[in-house]
Image (cartoon, rainbow, N blue to C red):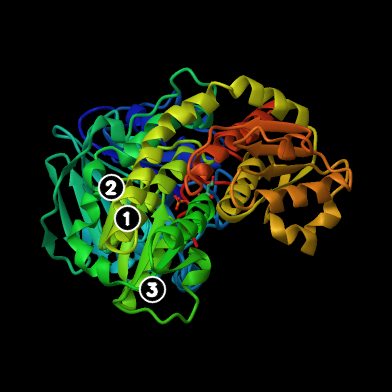
Amino acid sequence: MCGIICYCGHKQAVPILIEGLKRLEYRGYDSAGFSIVDKGKNKIVKAKGRVSRLEEKKIGLAMNSTFGIAHTRWATHGKPSEINAHPQTDCANKISVVHNGIIENYLELKKELEEKGHRFKSETDTEVIPHLIEENFDGDLEVAVLKSVERLRGTFGIAVLHADIDHQIIIVKRGSPIIVGVGKNEYFAASDSNALAPFTNKMIYLSDDEMAVLNTSGYYIKNLKNELLEKKIEVLDASEYKIDKRGFEHYMLKEIFEQPESVQNAYRGRLIESEGVSKLGGLEPVINRLKNINKLIIVSCGTSYYAGLLGRYIFENLTELNIETELASEFRYRRLKLDENVAVLAISQSGETADTLAAIKEAKRKGALLLGIVNTVGTSIAQITDAGVYNHAGPEIGVASTKIYTSQLVILTLMALLIGRYQHISFSEGSEIINALTGLPGQIREILSNAKDIKEIALKYSKYRGFLYIGRLYNYPTAMEGALKLKEISYIHAEGYPAGEMKHGPISLIDKNFPTVAIAPDDLTLDKMVSNMQEIKARNGKILSITNSATQKVLGISDDTIIVPKTIPILQPILNIIPLQLFAYYIANERGCDIDKPRNLAKSVTVE
Ligand code: M6R
């Protein structure tokens, strides 16, 4: 993995491929490369590191080619290097392949191909694909690709070209996203729509086991049984993929500051105030089934998992359902009894997270109703689920998720309200939730207007090497998410913990060099939180508290306090996380970290 862009048309391909790669940079990568065909010659340029290095290397290259494929790689098999970067080629250097995903049986295939005389250059799993195609090639690339993918096990989104076949690019999808972009007498393919934004807004989303053949006169789509398919062209709204930093130093900071709008977009048009209920068009096709489910299992990863963890408390509060929240990577291996009375809800920003996809495929096999909360339109999770709700938060480019987390929490609340109003939630309780929701954007703005003060506090803490984050009930997930934000972008160890568990182990870490971030809003857990904070103080631990009330109980034992506005307890975490996002951001910035592209991380994790 990580990003693919292809062009087939009448313009110079290289500038288009480079522009597309730059728009994929946010996904995280370690090397990049492209392949263009010029007068029957396959010209390949690769570079370790940034796309800008690739751009420098292409200078001097005759660039008349009007078709090519390109890739940003995030190493899975073989270290980051030019040799391992994609495109990978066959022995004759005629067939180029770029690939996202993992070929699970590559060792077996490699052995077989080597025995037939193929010579491998890289350590990648991907390289078996061009060799396999070479082995199957008899003048017809399409047939060779079809025969070859039959042999592949694992996940792939691939693009293939052959130097002897003018203006033909073949793409295939199984488990890893790849879409076709339709322009005027020119055609594109990419692993995500952001890469195509400057060129076209007309996209065709391939499903698993489908292939598209692009040439200058058009394109056609088939399944892997070689049957032609009719696929709908989706016309994307510019706001779905507009990318720029709008003057902010980093995408992450911009996205933190976008939260008043992204939170509002999550509930906009989805509230019926006169009935104290929400209205989610995406769930309407399954609403009768939804009314009859007795269990909801939320599956997701990373930040989306923490949203799900809080979702459990929200659903428990507003509905009569049994709720479980599971890490997607664990869920798929469990021996769970699922049936049509169980709904499995996948939460995913990218809509392509391999663990989450694998989990819901398992749930589908067992007959559960599949629901989704997805930000990126048309992606695999959005396609496979029976019904779902889009975040409409616009692209999130920073690898650290911020605006999508708060947006996910709003949508979880809307879903729980919708179901809860068929159950025990009254009109007035529903109205109270709606009022609180619509108050959030203004309250978030108020927190953001204090960013300078939060920065000052963050700088005081930027030299510590480890942190504990604690919270109870609704703010236990806030503690987990706050700690994740700090560790992933600043590389400082941070541990999120339910405050009650502190005395069962982590309290032994506390001393004057190990500060605690305590999320202590004024709710039914406050007194217990204060006791935990006293335990920290008694061991000389520093405390930064996040609270929604200027009570001396908290102020008196905190070294620093950030006060946020107050809302109802189930929504309070949406406000509490904002200063923690800023806190992590300012510390990482102070430490000179690569905030939007933290080391070792990818925005969209398409391998299990
Ligand atoms: O795209 P998804 O929401 O499925 O991604 C899940 C995680 O990979 C993601 O939230 C990750 O933990 C982020 N880096 C967190 O900031």
Q: In the picture shown, does residue 452 fall above or below 307?
A: above
Q: Nearer the viewer, residue 503 or 143?
A: 503
- Badge 2 vs badge 3, beta-carbon distance below 8 Å: no
- Find the distance from the CA under tag 3 to the CA under tag 1: 36 Å
Q: Please give left or right for residue 186 compared with residue 533 in the image.
A: left
Q: Earlier in the sequence, mark 2 or mark 3?
A: 2
Q: Nearer the viewer, residue 538 or 399?
A: 538
- Badge 3 vs badge 1, beta-carbon distance below 8 Å: no
Residue 589 picture quarter: top right
Decide if ligand 1 comes within 8 Å of the CB at mark 2.
no
- Badge 1 vs badge 2, beta-carbon distance below 8 Å: yes
> x and y percent of residue 198 in the render?
29, 28
The residue wearing badge 2 is 276
Task: Give neighbour class at mark 3: few <14, some 14-19, many 20+ (Cα, 10 Å).
Answer: some
Which residue reaches farthest top? 247
Q: In the picture shown, does residue 40 fall above or below 323?
A: above
> x and y percent of residue 545 in the render?
70, 38
Q: Earlier in the sequence, mark 3 or mark 1?
A: 3
The label on residue 426 is 1
Element at badge 2?
Answer: loop
Element at badge 1?
Answer: loop
Q: In the picture shown, does residue 153 fall above or below 9?
A: below
Q: Amino acid at mark 3?
A: Glu
Observer able to see residue 219: yes
Q: Earlier in the sequence, mark 1 or mark 2?
A: 2
Q: Amino acid at mark 1?
A: Ser
The label on residue 112 is none
Q: Nearer the viewer, residue 70 or 323?
A: 323
Q: Which residue is found at the position 14% from the left and 34% from the top?
A: 185
